[in-house]
Amino acid sequence: MVVMETAFFNRSVMLRMKNSSRVAGVAVIVSKTEPADGFSPHTTCPNQNTGVYSASYGPSYADCNVTLWNPLGNGLSYEDFGFPVFALKDENQTEVIRKCYEDHNMHVNGSAPLYPLCAMQLFSHMHAVTDTVTCMRRTDLQNRFSVNPEVLCDPLNETFVVAATRLDGRSFFWEKAPAGEAAVSGIVTLLAAIKALFPVTRETPPTRRIFFTFFQGEAFDYIGSSKMVFDMQRNEFVMDLDNVHSILEIGQVGLGSGGKMWMHSDPVSRGNSSVGEEVSALVEKMKSVGTDLNLPMSEPEVSQALPPSSFQRFLRAKQIPGLVLTDHQSAFNNRYYESVYDNAVNLNVTYPSGLSPDEQMHYETDTAKSLAKVATLVARSLYLQAGGQKTELQNITADPKTVAQLLYGFLVQKNNSWFRSVLPPEVTKKDSSLLGSGPPQFYIGLGPRVHGPVHSVTRFVQYILANLTGTVTNLTEKQCQNPSDIITENKDLYSYFWVSGPTSINNTRDPFCVRASVRLSKAISPAFELLEYGSRDYSTWTESRWKTIRARIFLVASRQLEMLTLGVGVAVLLLSLLMTYFISSKAELLFSAAREAPATTY
Amino acid sequence: MTVAVFFGCTFIAFGPAVSLFLFTIARDPLRVIFLIAGAFFWLVSLLLSSLVWFITVQISNKNSATQQRGLLIFGVVLSVLLQEAFRFGYYKLLKKANEGLLSLSQEDTMPISMRQLAYVSGLGFGFMSGAFSVVNILSDSLGPGTVGIHGDSQHYFISSAFMTLAIILLHMFWGVVFFDACERQRWGALGAVVVTHLLVSCLTFVNPHYQGSLIPTYIVLSVMAVWAYSCAGGSLRNLKLCLTCKDKDFLLANHRPR
């Protein structure tokens, strides 16, 4: 059993562990400070098989030939380890383990340590094996023939709010994905842009409508976006691919060095004249907005591919004009892409000491201010692209305060007063699982509960959108949950949310009903709808089911002592058998001074 | 593989007792019955003493370590006294039962002598006492780990097994001496049994210095063995004769017509 510090948690060491026959498990002590030279367990070319670039489309850009997006990636998340790898973060746990090691397992002057030695067991039994095809086949077989089918693995699925950024992230370890720069920067920017745009689009609506979408499951080969494109192709979505005028995707925008932002486009589709003209026009619009905002915008100098983005899935289906907005020109600025270190510290969201939680929430960090600028840029560009008037642009400004609140909620503490006020009352109750303390986790997790609870981040974004774009109605709780009876309300056009509302002075809340045009749509990979478990086109990620994960440490005695105990026991048993037989056979003689008659039975 | 420790400790703790049972008791159903009854009597005494201990612990101050230790000592002493009281009670019961059996039976001799009853009841007490002492420890010894992560000695299992062995044999010897003392009304011997029982139990408070508790216990065991042997009708002469294998002549010479 190997207990290692973060400094050793890299590809070469872990592959040595994997190839060694003596390693039964690894426990990584995840340090609080991130490694200085970056750490990313994702591959160097994220999602390279499910993007748009392949042998048939832009082959020179495929497999990151031109630009290596994630140079620090070591691909650890995609290695098959035959033993459990646990992450230990709690100080007390690691102290106990260290003490046990120092007391019992340390080498003394070069000689081997003496028994008893400290040992550890990691329990992480997985039901599924091999790959998705095998696992789903076994699950299907069981479902068809057995009374109590045991599901071995579940397709990763989630529901998503519709807007052009991603909602999720991952890391090497289960359920520990802070996804700061990878997801939160995009979410916060888009939400702030929506808030800035909403009043203006209501008063002076532009020619085209803006459709905001947040994709879930993108870290696992674009589950959300591939599902949406798939539905669009089958005419099962609210719009078709032909209804999509253009796409603006917000990539990783939190680490803009010097405030410069980059617009990426697909060089292959730009070769098509109509698409190329649209893209160039969009680039010009964004550049002019950027100049007004004192935020320089440029395109990458060399003709390079799109970074890994949901937009690539749309391009696979149809060549649509679009841009991906990021803070990096070629390789990611994010040195901790899809790792446990992509957190608030990575995004420079730190607060001066001595602030209460509410004060921290309203404190505008530099990151908040710069993200607000980016959000303003996005909002104004979207407005222009939708056919709005230039004169309205100065009314569209993202508020750094909102951005600061969102950053606090998504990076530091999800159980804050603002989140509590926008969420429904059953979530804000004390022991709700959705609002634990600490930042939210962005790993999408499993979904056997097809009708079950929605992922927490999806819920937050859904209710924040309702708060930002909805209108307050005076419906009661019952009416809010079932508005089909009421004539003035339209259940098909809108969704109705019963939210808690802010706390008043005497600590009570006054819930009310909000009507908003926010919709959730299930993000389950088309491979599972088509039952093509070995599909090369769509994501086939599944997650094994497991028993409770736990670990324990204890001492083990030397083999000699154990065998000695057994030997002594057997010797005692044999000796006593012999002696008893001997005494019993000679009992008449030995106990013959008895005063009772010897005719007693022996 | 700590199944080895489990079996080793089981054999150490119960080896002599099981072999005694196999060779001397198992063939006679009457002895088996009295053995089990003796075990049951010990169990009842344990039940009573644990009831008292449980109540006193509930009303005591759980945070004070000295009070808890004091309570433990009190519990041990009370338990020993109760066990001896129940041994006395069993003696009385057996006496009455024997008289009743004799009046009912058609033979003119008792089917089982008081001496054998003493031995069997002592062994019954020993079995039950040993079981309660060591079964939890045995089940823990199966696990992958051993004692010691908080600094305790890793000889815990084997010491407990040897202690249990001593206790079982001691109960057997105490039974013999006790019943003999009751028969001959020698109250000094009775007192000595109680005192040695108290001594052996209180010696375990010296743990984890296992030498401090095991060695005196084994000394007491050998003393009691000699005493019980003499109470049961043995003597040095018999022992010498037995060991030098001159038994055949002796038996012939001592053969009495039935």
Image (tube, rainbow, N blue to C red):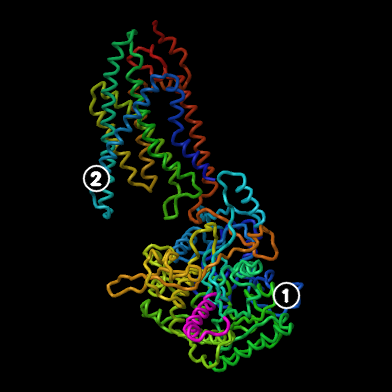
Element under label 2?
A: helix
Residue A448 drawn above or below residue A57:
above
Residue B152 drawn above or below residue B104:
below
Give the residue pinned by disc 2: B56
Element under label 1?
A: helix
Q: Farthest residue toward the top?
A: B257
Q: Nearer the viewer, residue B128 or A330?
A: A330
Magenta residues, start to end = A182-208
What's the magenta bit mostly, secondary-structure-wise?
Answer: helix
Q: Is residue A63 left or right of residue B51?
A: right
Regarding residue B217, the answer to whether it shows in the image is yes
Spatial separation of the CA atoms under disc 1 and disc 2 = 79 Å
Q: Residue at x 50, y 38 (%)?
A: B7
Q: Is residue A353 left or right of residue A456?
A: left
Q: Amino acid at mark 1?
A: Ala
Give the residue pinned by disc 1: A62
Neighbours of disc 2 within 10 Å: few (<14), some (14-19), many (20+)? some
Q: Chain of mark 1?
A: A
Q: Quadrant of residue A240?
A: bottom right
Q: Which mark is residue A592?
A: none
